[in-house]
Image: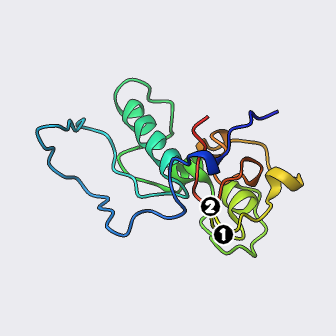
Amino acid sequence: MMNAYDCRKGPVSGPNPPDNMDPGYREASKSQVILTGVPSYIWQHGAVPTAIGMVMGYYDGIDCPDLYPGNTTFQTEYVNSLIAGDNGDTDCGAAYADHYHDYSCPIDTPENIIPDKSQTGGAHQNYSIADFSTTSFSARNCAYGETPVG
């Protein structure tokens, strides 16, 4: 059973990446530190799973080469599936058993959370970072792309 925390009490991220998001490298200010070698992945159905995926890509590249198969410098379709799978198809009418189609479709908003397979049942077995962090789960009162912090 999941704990009582839900996204309406403080989601980590909203439904979409910020409009002004710059997925590329930038110079650190005096108050920031940028770790060399951390891959810069583009938002994949939630900020928290994407950030965790980048950290895993970093460690895969330096100490733990078996976290992801192949080169983690680039955001491959396999890396995307481990962050939050969508089988490369964001059509909500597609019948895939993955994170996006089980928990994000149809895409909802914080004002109108639509029940998904976290409530209705029949979801795939967890395999992605987004699955394990319950991103977009309506059972946690989370809209598309939101991850509860508790």
| Callout 2 secondary element | loop
Amino acid of disc 2: Tyr
| The furthest residue to the top | 63
The way the protein has been coloured in the rendering is rainbow
Residue at image x 79%, y 59%? 116
Observer-nearest residue: 73 or 35?
A: 35
Direction from residue 112 to residue 12 in the image, left or right: left
According to the image, label 1 marks what residue? 107
Residue at image x 66%, y 54%? 142
61 over 145 or under it: above or below: above
Residue at image x 13%, y 44%? 29
Direction from residue 145 to residue 41 in the image, left or right: left
According to the image, label 2 marks what residue? 144
Question: Are dots 1 and 2 in contact, CB under 8 Å?
Answer: yes
**Lower position in the chain sequence, tag 1 or tag 2:** 1
Residue 1: x percent and y percent? 82, 33
Q: CA distance from mark 1 to mark 2?
A: 6 Å
77 over 114 or under it: above or below: above
| Callout 1 secondary element | loop
Residue 87: x percent and y percent? 64, 62
